[in-house]
Amino acid sequence: MFRKPVILSLAIFAIISCANINNPSKVANKFWNALSAKNFAQAKEYAVTGTMDDTSISEDAELKIIKIEKKARIENDLAYIPTKIEVVNNGEIKSYNFETVLTKENNLWKVDFVKTQTSMIGFSVEQFEKNLKEAGKEMGQAMGEAMKEMGKAMGDAMEEMAEKTQEALEKHKNKSIE
């Protein structure tokens, strides 16, 4: 008689608990709280695998979470949560308003830290690095071409100087003979 209500209550509790664990806003909140505590191991648990591999926070920096919205905007399997944090570093306070971006990994919401950083700074760090490498490569090629041209010009100038030196020696030799 009491078994059915107890089992039903436990089932409802389990469903609600799972829903809360897989709530994008709660995941974002746990992620930022872990980062605020400089607990990178825990923060990585709430992040998409590999998106925080090169992440660090200065020992002097302090991260303050100002606001993480409770409601996420979900579009194309991504959740966007308006977020505001302050970073205090060497007495200087910087505020950031951005969207924490989450995606599903193994059917659980996880913070995509690369997309979140892009939202924070307005451009993709990965794309910036790629563009920088490409620009460096193009600049190296252009300098290589310029050096080839400079080498050719120097070679031509040396050849011309050798010819004029030879002519001058011939003239001097002919004058000496006369």
Image: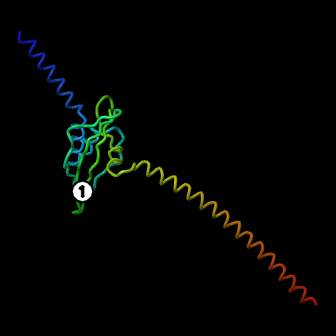
Q: Position of residue 73 (x, y in %)?
A: 28, 37
Assign the N terminus to one quadrant of the image. top left
Can you say whether 159 is above or below 136 in the image?
A: below
Few, some or many C-alpha atoms within 10 Å of disc 1 (few <14, some 14-19, many ≥20)?
Answer: some
Side of 72 where 170 appears, left or right: right
Of helix, strand and loop, which one carries label 1?
Answer: loop
Image vertical order of residue 21 relative to residue 33, above or below: above
Check the image and tell me how it is coloured: rainbow
Classify residue 7 by image quadrant.
top left
Q: Amino acid at mark 1?
A: Ala
The single residue placed furthest to the left in the displayed view is 2
Q: Is 41 displayed left or right of 3 in the figure?
A: right
Who's the residue at 28% across and 34% down the image?
109
Which residue is under mark 1? 61
Q: Nearer the viewer, residue 40 or 146?
A: 146
Q: Return the x and y of residue 10 as percentages of the image width and height.
A: 13, 20
